[in-house]
Image (spheres, grey):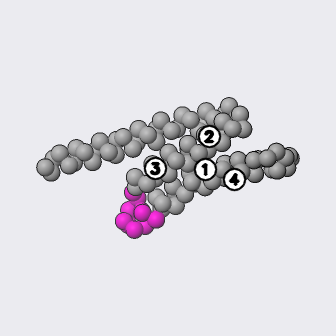
């Protein structure tokens, strides 16, 4: 295994990759906490924001290390996370129109 400090900036990139993974993984902690608070299973909007942010950071890292399977595995789900955010906001806009 290569040293993480073999080249200047390698440690920073590795930390960036770990940050993306932590950001992405924290979405489940948020979902769990919100579900416990509500007493039922819920999917808070923060779940999708953390999915999008963590996926994007991890994608940038995957591009940096030039790993095609990793790049593809991170890039494609970003569309789904974005679509889910769009659906959430579309539903909220429809609810506002109905109550107005």
> Which circle's residue, 1 or 4, is located before the other in the chain?
4
Q: Residue at x 40, y 42 (%)?
A: 84
Does residue 40 show up magenta in the picture? yes
Extreme left residue here? Answer: 100
Q: Quick one: SS at disc 1? A: helix
Give the percent coordinates (x, y) of residue 8: 79, 47
Residue 94, compared with residue 39, is above or below; it is above
**Residue to which mark 1 is pinned:** 20
Q: Residue at x 66, y 48 (%)?
A: 17
Q: Main secondary structure of the magenta part?
A: helix
Q: Is residue 64 left or right of residue 55?
A: right
**Residue to which mark 4 is pinned:** 15
Q: Is residue 49 left or right of residue 75?
A: left
User: Mark on residue 49?
Assistant: 3
- Mark 2 and mark 4 residues within 8 Å of each other at the beta carbon: no
> Which circle's residue, 2 or 1, is located before the other in the chain?
1
Give the percent coordinates (x, y) of residue 15: 69, 53
- Which residues fall within the magenta stretch? 33-42
Residue closer to the observer: 99 or 17: 17
Give the percent coordinates (x, y) of residue 87: 34, 41
> Which circle's residue, 3 or 1, is located before the other in the chain?
1
Extreme front residue here? Answer: 8
User: Mark on residue 60?
Assistant: 2
Q: Residue at x 61, y 55 (%)?
A: 22
> Which circle's residue, 3 or 4, is located before the other in the chain?
4
Q: CA distance from mark 1 to mark 4?
A: 9 Å
Q: Quick one: SS at disc 2? A: helix
């Amino acid at each position: 295994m290569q040293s993480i400090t073999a080249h200047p900036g390698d440690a920073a990139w590795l930390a960036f990759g770990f940050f993306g993974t932590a950001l992405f993984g924290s979405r489940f902690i948020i979902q769990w906490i919100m579900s416990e608070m509500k007493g039922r299973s819920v999917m808070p909007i923060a779940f999708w924001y953390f999915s999008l942010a963590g996926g994007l950071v991890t994608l940038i890292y995957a591009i940096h290390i030039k790993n095609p399977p990793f790049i593809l595995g991170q890039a494609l789900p970003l569309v789904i996370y974005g679509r889910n955010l769009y659906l959430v906001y579309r539903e909220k806009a429809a609810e506002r129109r109905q109550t107005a």
